[in-house]
Structures are given as structure tokens and as C-alpha cells.
Amino acid sequence: MLHGYAGTILRIHLTDGRIEKEPLPADLAESYIGGRGFVARLLFDEIEPDIDPCGEKNMFIAATGPLTGHFLPASGKTHFGSKSPATGGYADSNMGGHFGPALKYAGYDAVVLTGKATELSYLLIDDDTVKIRPAEKSRTKGALTAERMLKDDLGDGFQVITIGPAGENGVRFACISHDFGRQAGRTGIGLVLGAKNIKAVAVRGTGGLPVFDVEGAYAKGKEAFAKVRAKPGFKGWTPEGTAGLTNWANEVGAFPTRNFQTSYAEHYRQINGRAILDRLKITDKGCSLCPTPCGKYGFTKTALGRAHVEGPEFETIALFGGNCVLETIEDVAYANYVCDELGLDTISAGVVAAWAIECFEKGILTESQIGRGISFGDLESIVYLLEKTAHRDGIGDLLAQGVKAASESVGKGSEHFAIQVKGLEWTGYECRNAPSMMLAYLTSDIGAHHGRAWVLGHDVAGSWSSVHDLIVAGGAKEKPPKGMVTERSADYVIHSQHERPLFDALGTCRLQLMELGFEGEHYAELYTLITGKQKTWDQLLAVSEKIWHLTRVFNAREIKHFGRSSDYPPRRLCDDPITSGPNEGYRIPMEDIEFLLDAYYAARGWDANGIPTEATLKRVGLQDVVAPLKRLGILT
């Protein structure tokens, strides 16, 4: 028996309707933990090189971890993975809520979809019962609307994920929605589900999970809840959640504004966490067993309409409130709602919309091409672009490709300010005075995403402190010079790249550690008590390191000409100085980028082109991937 796990992988072959249940391999659980680890290994082993991300041979995986669904803080995570329509490489996206625990209680650690359904369908997983059912009546429906329809049809107890029109229509940054406001937003994972003709998955689980030391795990879980609540940042973090970062990001000059032209928004107090509490919030909304709920469920009213909406979270505030310059929290929340219903990732959508507006301002895109005039700060312009994109109508057909492909198609210098890495749009932190955070974005395995490593606090405050210490308590007393480039950046980034994604394998939220400083050793103890497998925090981090190298060679296998140039920034961020705010004049020139990459590759054990060496792969326990990579010419 595999304690902590449900013990089964559910495989659904959509083309012919076959449903198979196979035991979870013990060596997979031992060597890759769960969640992100399962996704990375299954993708590397089971999809053929160079397949079409939207084709029948691609896989869609929903995976949980050994801690998912157990009695400990915020154990409600689900990890989705595939080959990315956005980047052509490794794709994963993490989601909170209640879907993952329900999947495990139904008896499954992971669901693997292959092929394509013959008609628009949804999957019904009700403990042992698994069915493919028609979903034609929800075609073109919004993601939130489709979830409501399905829950009304099925009755109580089901947890549901859905896609919106964006996923049905082939938008490369389509997301998955759950629980009326939780999203797996990044890497186009919603498009993969749509390409398989799946509108939704509904799960109800009523079973239990085996625990190695029931009394010990319960006591440790109870202790963990108490320690999280006792952390100094608990009362400071919880009221505003991630939106509480808005003031700090502006004060340190890290808030992307006007398509990353600058890093400070004059109106930030009108779109911050306090504004949500004063003008939007109805109630807190947390994920499964979360003592520190980030979600703020509220109501917004604008000139374009009114809506109930969860959020906006910090990233949405940054990319719509800053990058698109929406100046009220009501407007930001409405753009958030429109994205949620259409099934669009708010991060990518905010970058794509800002790029389109700058193209219009510069005369690169014309009013006749767009269908109307558009401008920063105008909610009507933003919503127009979002709706066109989700339906691939007119200018939306271009924007649906994502900012990299769209800028390459348009040309005329628009690539210079297409803010992305590897085809994935940049998230909500400006980094031209933050070399470590810049390096983290550049080397992220899925593209420009802060979820892989967050070291901005070190760049601006010289501290590994929790976010609470940096923001609420004032940060470190000694700060390094802004923009200082050092080889140590590689060490900071690598540590964070092992630590943050480890939570995606364990199946629990990382915010208690990252935002409140709840120590990692507690998670190692919980893992040991639940699974019966003795592992220290450092040993778990070593597994996370192995997964990192595996996703890197997956990218090398799948992305043509993958290598050092794949880790380069958009030219704006190394050529153009920040135009205003606390960091006016700062940039990180390309020679410093090269220096940072050299240091990072050396510390990783990769060659000068950013490919893991044979010796490195063997050192981390990936000796079995060496031969196939040699056959493909990736390793020499």
C-alpha cells in the first residue's frame, strides 16, 4: 500500500472511449513525489517528440501530490500538465480550490487524457464510476456559466473544472476555471483540454486516504495550523491576500506599467488591497483547508456592467491595473471577471492587450485593423480586445496567438516590446533593477513566470525574509545597491527554483512558507508521517532539482533550436531604461544578462548553451534519459 496516495492512475482514451485504471507505480511516487513530478515524468516518457500540442497524441494530465487532501494547511492543490500550445515545450499550471482533494477521495492520484472526443463532452468521475458525457448544451458558454450549469445538473458534492470560449476557439493562453474564480492559467493548458473536445470535468469523491501514522499526522497537522496562525504576518497577510503586494511593488519600483515602459503607477492606491476591502469585498474565500485565504469574493459595478468576481489577485492588478493602466479597482475587477468567463489567463491577456495598445499608439496596428481606436486606461478598449481574442474574431485572431507569435507576424519593431520569454507572457514584476529576479524569469522552464522562483525580495532588500517581513515589517536593514549584478544571483535563483516548485509536487500551497515563513521542515515531517517514507527537507529538494533538469531536457527535445537564446529577455528590458518612478533610468544590459546566464549554467552543471550535461543528469538520478537524448542529438 502506498500511504498518502489514492493508489491509482485513471487513463481515459477519448478517441475510442476506453477507460483504464492502473496502479500508481511505487517507484514513480518514490522518485517524483507527485503533482509536478508525475506530470514531468509521464510527459517525457509517453509523448512522442515533436507532436502537435493541439493534436490527439498530446496528453492532458491532472495530478495530485501525497499531501493533497490531508489534514494540513492549504492541501487543496491540483497540478495540470501537457505539451504547451504557447511555447511548444513543457507546460504545467497549478490550481487551488477543492478539485484535487475530490479526485483523490474518488480514488485517483492522476487523470491522463489522450486522443480526442468525437463530440464536445465532459467527464464524469463519481468514485468508481467514470463516464464520457455529451456537453453540447454548454458549447460557447462562459467558464463560470458552464460550471453553474453542470453543478445544477449533477447535484451536490461535485467539484468541477471548465473551459470557456477561449479554450474552445484555440486561444494559446486559454485557462482552466474552477470554483467560480480559481484558475490554472498559464501555458495554454485550457486550450489542450479544448483541443480534446472536453468542456469540463466533474469529480465527486467519498472515500478516504491511507495514512502511515494517523495519530502522528493528525497531531502534526494540528500543530501546523496553530503555527501558521501564530506567525507574525498572519494578521497582516490575510485581510488583503496577494493584493497586499500592490503598495510594496510600487514603492520599490517593481510594478509593470504601460506595457513595461515604467515600473510605477501613480494611481496604485486606487487599485490596491485596501481598495478591494473598501469597495468590492463581500467575503473571504479560501481553498481546501486554507487558514490564510487569498481569495476576496466581491461585487463590481462599472460603466460596462456589474459582476460578482473573485479577486482581483496581485497579478491581475499588476497586468490590468498597471500594465493596461486601468485606474480603479472596479475596472480591474471587471476585466478580471470578463477573463474568468471567457476562459483567458489574466496575466497573458494583460500583456497581450498592452502590446496591442502600444502597437496602436505607434501606428503599427491601425484602427481599421483593430476595428476601433484603443487606449491605455480605457476599460472599454480592454474588454473589446478580450472578447475579440476569446472568439478569434478580427484582430482577436492575431492576439489569440500570444504576444510572441503576434509580434513576429506583425513585425515593424513590435517584437522589441513583446514582453515574454519562450513564448509565455511575463508576470507582474518589473525587473530592470532586479538581476536575480530577471534571471529567475529567463530560466523558468515554462517561460516568464514568477511561480518558479521569487527572489525579488533579495534584489530590493537583500533578504531571504518572508514576504511579510519585507512588506509588513519593513524588510531588511541593509539593502544591496539597486541593480547589482553578482554571481550569487544564480545561487539565489536555483534555491528558489527547487523550493517553490516542490510544493507543486507535494500537492499543497507554498504561500504559508513564502509569505509567512512557515518552515519547510514541517512539510518534510508531514510527508514522512503520512507516507511512511523518511525524507528530510533537503532530500525533498533534491527530488525537485531532478524534476527541474527533466523539464529542461524535455524543452530541449521539443522546442526547435532550444538553448541559450531561449533564455534571453525581451529587448525592452535590456535596452530601454525605466522611464519614471523610483528606478528611473535602470536597465540590465545584454552583457550582464550573458554574465548571469554563464553563472547560472555553471552552477546548474549545464553547458554553455544551457543544456544539462550527461554527468549532471547522472548525478541527479536521470541516467535513464541520457541514451534517448543522445539518439536525438541533444547530448553529444
Image (cartoon, rainbow, N blue to C red):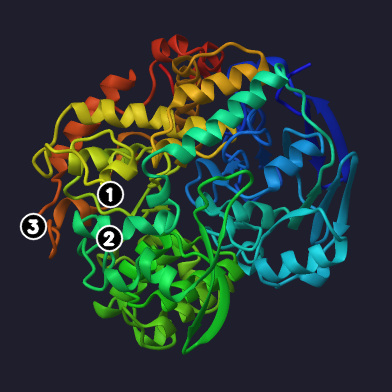
> Is 175 in front, or is 528?
528
Name the quadrant containing residue 486. Answer: top left
Q: Nearer the viewer, mark 3 or mark 1?
A: 1
> Is 300 in front, or is 142?
300
Q: At 26% across and 55% down in the image, what residue appears?
A: 248
Q: Is residue 91 shown above or below 306? A: above
For residue 622, side relative to residue 209 (left or right): left
Helix, strand or loop for disc 2: helix
Helix, strand or loop for disc 1: helix
Label 1: which residue?
Answer: 471
Question: Which amino acid type is marked by label 1?
Answer: Ile
Bin the neighbour count of mark 2 within 10 Å (Cα to Cα): few under 14, some 14-19, many 20 and up.
Answer: many
For residue 594, side relative to residue 398 (left or right): left
* Residue 405 visible within the image: no
**Numbered badge on residue 585:** 3
* Quadrant position of the N terminus in the picture: top right
Question: Which amino acid type is marked by label 3?
Answer: Gly
**Numbered badge on residue 247:** 2
